[in-house]
Amino acid sequence: MVNSKCWVVIIYFLPPPLPLWYNNFVMKNVKKELKFKVLLEQDENGIYVASVPAIPGCHAQGKTYKEAIKQIGEVIELCLEVAKEDKKYRDNIDFSEGTEKKARFLGVVDIPVRLGFSL
């Protein structure tokens, strides 16, 4: 019986660190995803009206819920394009809503209340 020992050597090769210019390039070209709360209402004519409270002037409408959601998504992108060029407008947008964890909006409830006097 032959008693032999076998040695296994594993060599890990680490890639060289990336140059600083590469990291800066990548970070400038990474698109950030933001999430904004959209308030959606249906008016007296059945039209869905969507608005984003965090972005001034960001409103859209549609004949269906799906259409209103699609429209408001496009309007948000347009508002952010304007904000890229217009610093004054950008300063009025609440970007923290899209990036930070905040209180959640749960819904709107109609509460019946008896009025003790006439209007």
Image (cartoon, grey):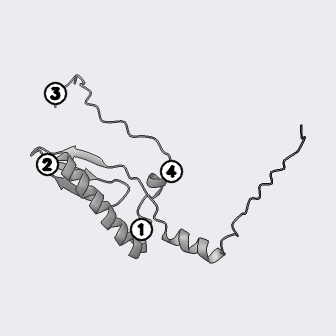
Q: Do labels 2 and 4 touch, CB within 8 Å? A: no
Asked whether, in this view, residue 41 is left or right of residue 106, the answer is: left
Q: Secondary structure at mark 2?
A: loop
Residue 64 drawn above or below residue 112: below
Q: Residue furthest left?
A: 45
| Residue 88 coordinates in the image, percent (x, y) | 41, 72
Instruction: Find residue 21 and name its label.
Output: none
**Which residue is located at x 49 percent, y 71 percent?**
29
Q: Which of the marked residues, 4 or 1, is nearer the chain's N terminus? A: 1
Q: Specify whether residue 57 is in view.
A: no
Crowdedness near tag 4: few (<14), some (14–19) or many (≥20) residues, C-alpha within 10 Å: few
Q: Secondary structure at mark 3?
A: loop
Q: Identify residue for label 3.
A: 118
Instruction: Find residue 100 and name its label.
Output: 4
| Residue 55 coordinates in the image, percent (x, y) | 36, 59
Residue 119 drawn above or below residue 55: above
